[in-house]
Image (cartoon, rainbow, N blue to C red):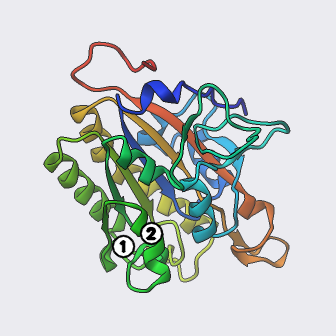
Amino acid sequence: MPEVPIPDMHAIVGSHDIVFITLDTLRHDVAQALFAAGELPVLARFLPATGWERRHSPATFTYAAHQAFFAGFLPTPSAPGRHPRLFASAFARSETTSPHTYTFEQASLPEALAARGYRTICIGGVGFFNQQTALGSVLPALFQESHWSAGMGVAGRHSTEKQVALAMQLLAENAQRTFLFINVAALHTPNRAYLPGCRADNLDSHAAALRYVDGALAPLFAACAARAPTFAIVCSDHGSAYGEDGYRGHRVAHDSVWNVPYAHFFIPSSHQHSQGAAP
């Protein structure tokens, strides 16, 4: 799978809204199979012809992966070598910071973008974003504005629709350049509700959850296009094992967990005549 080119992030920060969506627990193989079968009509509009890029997550579970993401360590391209990053919190002798990398002095991307005048919004999904405990408040506290409800969590059958509806409301109310982060919980266990008759989570229910998420994201992408030019990052934070080599779940060093789908792309403003090249 070809590596996605790195745009000049210095030109993007300040001129574009930035939307970062983590499809929590999504496996690369499942995501790519649905793309190849034509079952992701919404996301496929923004993916390259080859589909999802396979990358390696910096961690095997949500909390650790997002701590890395917000410091600029997004999933790493799976081919060997040093791969330039989109964002980086500055530190001496970084080998993955390039002239196109947006480097910042703050400890996290949300804090850095807030300092640049962005409104930073977190819409949580899994428990690490629920603000119900000290641990569940660490990641949301990086943002100026954080939201979560049980209906947006792992047990919410319509969680992505609720997250998207809230995101659209917040975007409509806000005239500032915006950094919108959404942690999509629908793929996380329990996902059996997305496959009628399924009694135990499996790869088929995992895939069914992704089909649901794909459709639910359509209004958000349309709202972004209507609002402003947008740079989007959509990826998984880790995968999940469904019995491979005896493993189930995540927080284990297995290929089904390490390998994640990744994409970044532009959503051009509908007010523009061009079709979405980088600035």
Mark in the foreground, 2 or 1: 1
Q: Amino acid at mark 2?
A: Tyr
Residue 208 percent coordinates (x, y): 50, 61
Element at label 1: loop
Q: Which residue is mark 1?
A: 157
Mark 2–mark 1 Cα distance, whole angstroms, equals 8 Å
The mark total stands at: 2
Residue 174 percent coordinates (x, y): 18, 47
Q: Amino acid at mark 1?
A: Arg
52 lies left or right of 270: right
Depth order, front residue of 199/213: 213
Residue 69 percent coordinates (x, y): 58, 54
Q: Which residue is mark 2?
A: 194
Residue in the image at 45% along x and 84% along y = 134
Q: Earlier in the sequence, mark 2 or mark 1?
A: 1
Do labels 2 and 1 touch, CB within 8 Å? yes
Residue in the image at 55% along x and 59% along y = 207
In the image, farthest residue toward the left? 173
Count neighbours of disc 2 (C-alpha within 10 A) and say few if under 14, some if 14 to 19, many if 20 or more.
many
